[in-house]
Amino acid sequence: GQNIDQPTEMTATEGAIVQINCTYQTSGFNGLFWYQQHAGEAPTFLSYNVLDGLEEKGRFSSFLSRSKGYSYLLLKELQMKDSASYLCAVRSPTDSWGKLQFGAGTQVVVTP
Amino acid sequence: DTAVSQTPKYLVTQMGNDKSIKCEQNLGHDTMYWYKQDSKKFLKIMFSYNNKELIINETVPNRFSPKSPDKAHLNLHINSLELGDSAVYFCASSPVPGEKLFFGSGTQLSVL
């Protein structure tokens, strides 16, 4: 089976840094995605990791450790518009058609 | 032009009715999906089609029937609607199975 855990909610101040952790226990692994979802809107792609290490993309970075079943999304220089839910999703091996299993999401609240 | 468009955006209906949600993508992707997001914000895959062929069919009541007339369209028909079907349904597409998802804006289904 699949188990993906992320904190339910995190609060941080504008300009600060927030790290959203995601741990997973899955029957197979072929990559991990992070998506951002604003309230009432569709999820949008943020990042993808398949090898261990850090991927940096502007203010957002994502890290993966396959041996630990662990990833984090780092949001730097927080802005009010970053208030949203952040979804971690694990991809199954290709023999399962690369099916994505999503975590429940972490609601990030940015305060002035 | 909207990349993945689904209609209607809101659907309010009585228990026992039959309803359909339509989805179209103009990205030239091979793969399309239906996801359900419940009140706890879990995003769960229901179906996936690759080049009009069903490749993922999760444990979904057979009251739900997807149809893909061509690779740019994936519709969802729901028979005998139940209260528990109330959720947001997202259509999505990806270039090939398991790649980055592009989501439609969602259909908020409320069954009364």
Image (spheres, grey):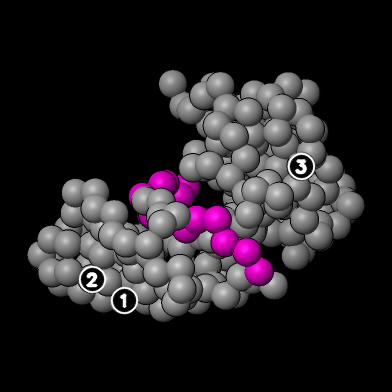
Task: Label 1, secondary structure: give it.
Answer: strand
**Given contact means CB atoms under 8 Å apart, are the residues at marks 1 and 2 in contact?**
yes
Label 2 sits on a secondary structure element that is strand
Left or right, residue B90 beside residue B16: left
- The amino acid type, in three-letter code, at marker 2 is Val
Residues in magenta, as a range? A27-46
Which residue is labeled 2 in the image? Answer: A18
**A49 vs B66, nearest the viewer:** A49
Indicate whether B74 appears above or below A7.
above
Q: Which residue is drawn at 82% across and 48% down?
A: B64
Chain identity of mark 1:
A
Please state the horizontal and vertical placement of residue A94, each as a whole percent of the image: 65, 48
Residue A10 disc label? 1
Q: Residues within 10 Å of mark 1 (few under 14, many from 20)?
A: some
Co-location on one chain, circles 2 and 3: no
Q: What label does residue B55 carry, if any?
A: 3
For mark 3, name the chain: B
Q: In which quarter of the image is residue B10?
A: top right
Disc 3 versus disc 1: nearer the observer: 3
Q: Share a chain, discs 3 and 1?
A: no
Residue B36 at least partly seen: no
User: Residue B61 at what x, y percent from top left?
Assistant: 85, 57
Secondary structure under tag 3 reads strand
The verdict on residue B21 being magenta is no
Alpha-carbon distance for marks 3 and 1? 37 Å
Q: Quarter holding the N terminus of chain A?
A: bottom right
Q: Tell me if residue B104 comes above or below residue A107 in the rendering.
A: above
Measured from the top left, where is residue A108 in percent x and y? 32, 68
